Amino acid sequence: MSRSIQRVSLAFLFAFGLLALAIGRWSIASPDLIARDDNPRRVFVEQQIQRGAIVDRADRVLAETIPASGTLTRHYPQPEAAPAIGYSSINYGQSSVEEALDAILRGPYSFTDQLLHRPRVGRAVRVTIDAQWQSDLAARMKQPGAAIVMSIPDGAVRAMVSRPSFDPNTLDENWKSLSTDPSSPLLNRATQGLYQPGTIFQTLLLADAIEQGKVALTQAVSRPDQPVALNELVIECAHSGPMQTLAEAYANACPGPFADLGVTLGESELISMTQRWRLDTPPSLEIRTTAAPTLTIPLSTTEALNAFATGQGQLTVSPLQMALVAATIGNYGVMPSPFLVQDVQSIDGQWMPYHTGDTENLPRRIISPLTARSIVAAMRSQDNASGHGGVAFSGDKQLSWFIGLAPSDQPKYAIVVLIETPTGNAATEAEDIGRSVLEELLRG
């Protein structure tokens, strides 16, 4: 009798064991179930994650997780950093650094951690953004557009602004209006906006022609201030001043000599130039970037060559790409490898470099140091800051561009500013902002 009772008891224990394992797998170990959007437990679990902080280069907090009504919520003390830092939402996912470093910010969570219901604690991330620079640049950008400050020679992104933008603290309640707004506030114009380069394209064109020995900055040009007509569009000099040499035509952003230069270089060289400067490839950065698609319109006519050379052809560029052009000129012809994430926190709380042993996107020489320095010398110089600015046209919009370097004699900072719908003087709208930022950086 006792043996029968023992057998029955063992059978019940075995059955309960199987049931416990099944329930454990069903409730804990099944990733498909947990990932389902209609699983309320998933929402609860997400709200209990102590997501790691994101701090700027001086350890000032840009994103943190704080308690709110019995759960945890993401808080952004500096909303103007949203284009670079992004957002993290249970309903709408992540963007920018929050997306790219999601696995680190969420932290590891093993099966044992799940089984024992241990709290999930993420690791912190330190970015290259300077919170003060970010705030100052954002305050200057009142109109739609984008701006980036990059340090030389390392390629660290020190500030990144996109206008219009959004407040990540109120993302969930404003998502519908943000996602349907025709001005696209959720788009990071700095890294994903594509625009006609217009006059700013002269910098690449001139550097390439000098590098090949096709032109010299001191050579005389005839009628440099003559406007260029492209169908119904007429492009004129952005500035006025002495214009006897090619260098002076460049300083005043006059399109005529560069339209002619496009014809001299021809289709093959113009296409090769865009590839050499990596304008056909999305820049490598931790967050999402983009580049224009491959050119499909042949440059087989003089008008097509003129349009391309004046930055009014099929080619479009992002502000990040033009920031890299400026940084290349300032870095003696070497294009830096841009980065936005500096360090990540180890499990024991120590900071570790994020890009250790990264050999996929090394700095690359584009032009010679002599050519680069000659371009800097030809730029308009003011208060130890050099730059080139002008206008592009896109449909019924004017675009104001500026790329700049400071200090002029040994650049440490590169800047790009783009204004989409400038008011007042479109030729200097972006330049006024860019130069004021560079002057502030030199004072600091």
Image (cartoon, helix red, strand yellow):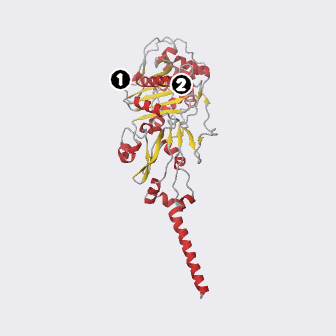
Q: List the residue tagged with mark 2.
A: 204
- Residue 302 visible at all: no
At mark 1, the secondary structure is: loop
Q: Give the CA separation, mark 2 to mark 1.
A: 27 Å
Residue type beneath disc 1: Gly
> What percent of the width, then of the height, locates residue 240?
42, 14
> What percent of the width, then of the height, locates residue 12?
55, 78
Measured along the vertical axis of the image, is residue 204 above or below residue 293? Answer: above
216 relative to 80 in the view: left or right: right
> What percent of the width, then of the height, locates residue 88?
45, 47
Q: Could you say which is closer to the camera, residue 292 or residue 81? A: 81
Measured along the vertical axis of the image, is residue 42 above or below residue 325? Answer: below
Q: Could you say which is closer to the camera, residue 72 or residue 171? A: 72
Residue type beneath disc 2: Leu
Measured along the vertical axis of the image, is residue 316 above or below residue 114? Answer: above
- The count of marks equals 2
Query: Which mark is drawn over residue 226?
Result: none
Examine the image and state in which quarter residue 146 appears: top left
Q: List the residue tagged with mark 1.
A: 424
Q: Residue at the spot x=54%, y=17% of the render?
A: 377
Looking at marks 2 and 1 on the same chain, the residue that comes earlier in the sequence is marked by 2
- Of tags 2 and 1, which is closer to the observer? 1
Q: Could you say which is closer to the camera, residue 212 or residue 325? A: 325
Examine the image and state in which quarter residue 355 appears: top right
Q: Residues within 10 Å of mark 2 (few under 14, many from 20)?
A: many
> What percent of the width, then of the height, locates residue 65?
46, 47
At mark 2, the secondary structure is: helix
Q: Are marks 2 and 1 in contact (CB under 8 Å)?
A: no
